[in-house]
Image (cartoon, helix red, strand yellow):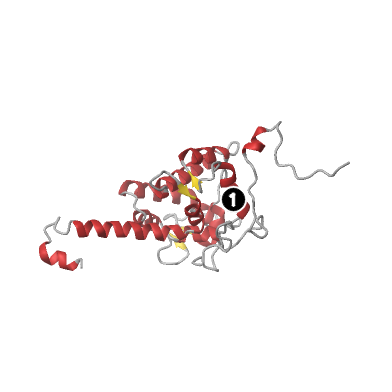
Amino acid sequence: MAPIGIVSAIKEAPITSECPPPSMAGIKEPSTPRATRAISKEKPEGDARSPDNKTVLQQHMAFWDRNNTGVIWPWDTYIGFRRLGFNFLISLAAAPVLHGTFSYPTMKGWLPHPLFPIYLDRAHRTKHGSDSEVFDTAGRFVPDKFEAIFSQHDKEGKGGLNWADVQALVYHNMNCNDPNGWVAGRLEWWVTYLLLRDEKGLLSKEKIRGVYDGTIWEEVAKDVERKKHKRTLVYPDIHGCGEEGTAALQ
């Protein structure tokens, strides 16, 4: 009898055809989690800016650790969201939601902290269900899980995800009896899409990779600051600053 090869889809289970496994050509040991690099077929070495002393999940969160102390406070989260261009109300709401959810799992003891800090050395404990599983339970990056996002949901080979793809992704990731994960997964992907989509409504693969290792956050913050500065230059006298105020901007 001829040997049976690898079978990844059968007609009796249509979902297996709808969710093909990714081609991992160019990535060595794609199922081996990477502790410090978020890699892809396009970037097999990851981003050179990624530090070697933080896990990829810690890198993902480090933007909000403004003073590099290893602790994120609610006001850090508020300031971080403002730097990313979110308005006052969204930024204000994000702090209690995120810290109310993720602070306690990162505590060393049983007693909660009254100010709800998030400790980055235990960032892996913030992982929730109904996710893409790109982060493993140690906060490492799993390349084949990342590539599976696009083999399963970027069917046209667009190089990213549109709104319908994102909706299909979060639905596909839903685990049984996991309402917290359902809400968290939707909020994360919806916010990511609304923040990073291009003018054609596409959330690119590289930007998604940059979300995982956090390198995209500083890029967005710098772009927001440039736009603010540009508006100030266009309307230098809006508060009656006159010539003195205009000169101060130069």
Position of 148 compared to 186: left or right? right
x, y (%) of residue 29? 68, 59
Residue flagged by tag 1: what amino acid is it? Glu
Q: Residue at x 42, y 58 (%)?
A: 217
Instruction: Work out whether 211 lies above or below 158.
Output: below
Position of 61 compared to 80: left or right? right
Q: Nearer the viewer, residue 222 or 44?
A: 44
- Residue 81 visible to the viewer: yes
x, y (%) of residue 194? 40, 45
x, y (%) of residue 141? 58, 57
x, y (%) of residue 62? 46, 61
Residue under label 1, please give it: 147
In which quarter of the view is residue 30 placed?
Answer: bottom right
Instruction: Work out whether 243 lies above or below 104.
Output: below
Under tag 1, what secondary structure?
helix
* Image quarter (top left, top right, bottom left or bottom right) of the N terminus: top right
Q: Residues within 10 Å of mark 1 (few under 14, many from 20)?
A: many
Q: Residue at x 66, y 33 (%)?
A: 14
Position of 31 compared to 50: left or right? right
Instruction: Work out whether 174 lies above or below 229.
Output: above
- Residue 108 visible to the viewer: no
* Image quarter (top left, top right, bottom left or bottom right) of the C terminus: bottom left
